[in-house]
Image (spheres, coloured by chain):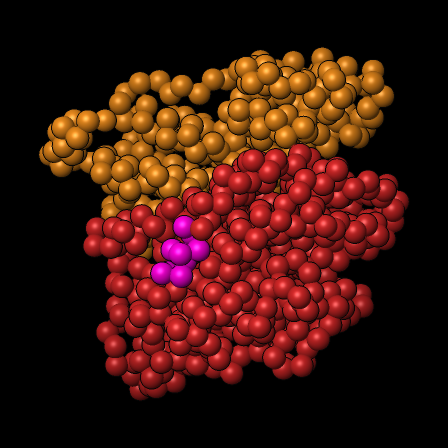
Amino acid sequence: MSPRTKTSMNKTAQKIRKPKLAVWKFSSCDGCQLSLLDCEEELLPITEYIEIANFPEASRASSKGPYDISLVEGSITTPHDAERIHQVRRQSKVLMTIGACATAGGIQALRNFKDVKQFISAVYANAKYIETLNKSTPIADHVFVDFELRGCPINKLQLLEVINAFLNGRKPNTPASAVCLECKRRFITCELVTHGALCLGPVTQAGCDALCPSYARGCFGCFGPKETPNTSSLSTYWNSLGIKDDELVRLFRGFNAYAEAFRRESEAHEK
Amino acid sequence: MKSKTIKVDYLARVEGEGGLLVKVSGKKVTDVKFNIFEPPRFFEALLRGRQYSEAPDITARICGICPVAYQMSSVQAMEHAFGITVDGQLRALRRLLYCGEWIESHALHIFMLHAPDFLGYADAIQMAKDHSPIVQMALKIKKIGNGIVGLVGGREIHPINVRVGGFYKLPTCQELETFVEPLKWACDSSAQTVKFVSKLPFPDFERPYEYVALHHEREYPMMNGRLCSNKGLDIEVPEYENHFMEEHVSHSNALHSILKERGAYFVGPMARYNLNFDALTPAAQSAARSAGIGKGTNNPFKSIIVRSVEMLYACEEALRIIKEYEPPEKASVAVQPKAGIGYGCTEAPRGILYHRYRLDERGNILDAKIVPPTSQNQKTIEQDLREFVPPRLHLTQEKLTWQCEQAIRNYDPCISCATHFLKLEIDGNAGEGGKCEID
């Protein structure tokens, strides 16, 4: 960027009201919102164009809504949070979920597969001050979501791309294709075909740039199911190699266990 | 009698969701609650039935700020259960990975979460308007730490390259060498940081804490050592549960951890530093002396200096490991699962992180126990507030509230970590301390 363009952009930034960005946390590890602070080189330049209006992990100050973009991290696991997400939605023009917890319920959604109702009620009778729902659910189960950014954690470059796209009124460039495509583009030897690795790459959405295969291990599905994944075909192949059903259940029951396609596949292999 | 309530509904610049309540009647503090309302995620329960090999990836998700710590404690526990030793360059690489996490986590806390309190800013972005070079430097140091985690671990948040027995893939000498120059710069910058933070205005506040940290005969503790304290504790890690216990209090979704004999204790940089000063590098020692904490410190507000000294140490240590690196023959040692119990304890940036797993003969997890640093510091945090508030009642409500928040941020609390281990006590359960987890 030439100094001149930069000055003119700075002027524009000063004149126009900066769009307001808010960050909200629900049940999560904080890693996805940390991605914003991990934008070490971009963080200060971003604030020239965007007002970070609510981001408790980073600031004591917060300004009132409505917000132009809300980034929502985490899943809904308590009655209080099931209410709170509606307040967030009402104050947000665009609501974007960031990460596997907000998009699919996260690793804490493993509880969704257990019959816990009876157990929880037994526990609650004596521990009233613990409030928890018996399922961990994605944000889209509760309110309308404008965009879902995948990953456990999200890719910070994709985060910047999505914020940029929304501010400029264009479609974000975050392909819904498989990790396999990224692998091929990087000329990485196929872990599944060559080493018989349990690699979820064929059914997992791209976004990590085939990280695990590039470190000689199979993909374990951080970015959730890709568009139209053929999970049963992959399972049939593994069954033919002698992989047992309980192993397949564990494989599909990771950080995106409650995402529709992975959930159905793991249930199909459960006795 | 005049009464006063200090209340913060949602604490800022900490990881996770917590609040603060201090009630004062006259000149006496009648109630202190460091209230944790972050929803529990029941990790110990959901680990049951998973394979030993999945523990490093699953437990990393407890905390996005210190995933390496979870991976290190879990692999150590599994290796202990199977009787495997990971040594030599593989151990050095793990230490390098840990250095990366210390650097990025400490840089984040020193500059972005803690320093704004001392200088009167709401956040680092506001601070950058007046202290641009400092914030730029902070971001650059943080980036170098993250870069090391990214290279050795695969990515900064939730690394993918750590496995029981070692790694999936080894970095090359050339890849590591790209960090030599940046780390040299980071050593100088960390030394400057120590100088900068030592001049901040510190409230006059000291208490006779019991510090608990790992202690190793040859090195500043990260992954190995005995668990020691300044009040006589000196045990092997597997003895942890004989000496520590967890209490369940109504206002917190995290259990309070205490020493059975003496109650509250203090873990983290202050504890490591006060117990292991001799193991620091000469440069780190001399920086600490110039900053006026050469003989140790009992002022938790000065933890920002200690963190800076540790950041300097971690940069120097990373540089040493890279210079001495020779790629080992294999990326990992062979692992043969067997039934048993394994213990692990490593020094997360915020303090000791204890893991215990019971495994069956195929390496399936039968049960797990994880005690994160913040739940160990909770009681000490509340005790600090009890003593910190009374002499400062003349301050305006706003100022006192801010200082109370700052007193909590001294501990760099990671509430996300602390909460996820909740167990519920069921009244009338047979036997002593019959605990029950939501499964």
Q: In the rendered view, would you say A112 is above or below B193?
A: above
Residue A210 in picture, x, y percent from top left: 57, 24
Quadrant placement of the N terminus of chain B: bottom left
What residue lies at 30% left-to-right and 80% top-to-bottom?
B393
Residue B192 within the magenta-colored segment of the rendering: yes
Q: Is residue B163 visible?
A: no
Point out the stretch of residues depicted in magenta: B185-193
Position of B1 with respect to B293 (left or right) is: left
- The one of B371 and B290 positioned closer to us in this rendering: B290
Q: In the rendering, what colour is chain B? A: red
Q: In the rendering, what colour is chain A? A: orange
Residue B338 within the magenta-colored segment of the rendering: no
Residue B227 in picture, x, y percent from top left: 68, 69
What residue lies at 67% left-to-right and 81% top-to-bottom?
B232
Q: In the rendered view, would you say A48 is above or below B274?
A: above
Q: Is residue B381 visible?
A: yes
Q: In the rendered view, would you say A146 is above or below A43?
A: above
What residue lies at 37% left-to-right and 26% top-to-bottom?
A161
Residue A12 in picture, x, y percent from top left: 13, 31
What residue lies at 53% left-to-right and 70% top-to-bottom?
B273
Residue A236 in picture, x, y percent from top left: 77, 15
Position of B149 with respect to A125 (left or right) is: left
- The one of A81 and A70 positioned closer to us in this rendering: A70
**How many labels, in total?**
0
